[in-house]
Image (cartoon, helix red, strand yellow):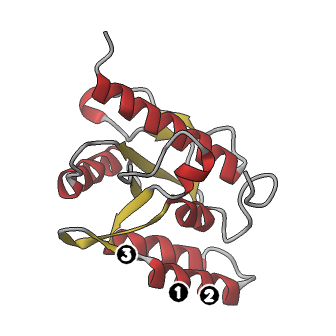
Amino acid sequence: MVNPAKKKGTSLETWTVRYLAWALQDTRIDRMPLHGNADQGDLIGVRFCGEPVCVECKDTKQPNYRKHWRELLVEMANMDTPYGVLVQHRKGVGVKSLKGMAHQMAVFDVETLERFLSSHMGHALSGLDGRRELANRLRREAKPVPSNPTLVWLPLERFALLLNDGLPLGPDHGED
C-alpha cells in the first residue's frame, strides 16, 4: 500500500509542476528524480535569470518551516544555485486545481527573497520602472511565516509572476 503522507507529497509536487508549467508556459518543468544524499529539490526545469531554482514541496499536517527551510538550503547547495523556494500546502486550500495552487505558500528567508528581487531588478536593461514596481509590491505582500521571524511567504501565483518577469501568467493571461 502507498504511504498516505507520501501520496499527499507526490500530489503537491505533481500539482506544483502543473501550475508552474502552465503559469510559465514551460514544458521543461517536471518532477526531479531522487538523488539520495545529494537531493536537489523536488522539481527540475524551474529557472530564474538563467539559473536553476531549487523547489522543495511539503504537505505536512504540522508545517515545520524551519526544518524544511534547512533541508532546502542543503538542496540548493547540492544544486549549486542561489535560488530556492519552499512550496508549503496551506491548510484548507485545495491543491488539485490551478486556482488552488495559485494560493499555496511560496516560502523564503528574507535574504533569499531579496536575492530574487534584486536579481529581477538588474537582469535586463529595459522596463526598470515596471520591475521596481513589481519588486516593491512583492516586498509589501510578503507575509511573515507563523512562529518564524526569519521566513516570509507569498502566494505561489506571486512567485510565478516574479519568475515570469511580471508578464501575465498562463496561455490565457491568468484565467483557468
Q: Is residue 133 left or right of residue 153?
A: right
- Residue lying at 41% horizontally and 54% vertically, measured from the top left: 81
Residue 67 locus on image (x, y percent)? 18, 51
Using the rendered view, name the quadrant where residue 149 is placed: bottom left
Q: Are marks 2 and 1 in contact (CB under 8 Å)?
A: yes
Measure the alpha-carbon separation of dots 2 and 1.
Answer: 5 Å
- Tag 2 residue: 133
Using the rendered view, name the quadrant where residue 57 is placed: top left
Q: Which callout, 3 or 2, points to the residue nearer the camera? A: 3
Mark 2 neighbour class, 10 Å CA radius: few under 14, some 14 to 19, many 20 or more: few
Quick check: can you spot residue 128? yes
Measure the alpha-carbon separation of dots 1 and 3.
Answer: 14 Å
Q: Which callout, 1 or 3, points to the residue nearer the camera? A: 3
Callout 2, which amino acid? Glu
Q: What is the secondary structure assignment of the residue under circle 2?
A: helix
Q: Is residue 148 left or right of residue 135?
A: left
Using the rendered view, name the quadrant where residue 110 is placed: bottom left
Mark 3 neighbour class, 10 Å CA radius: few under 14, some 14 to 19, many 20 or more: some
The vertical placement of 99 against 114, above or below, is above
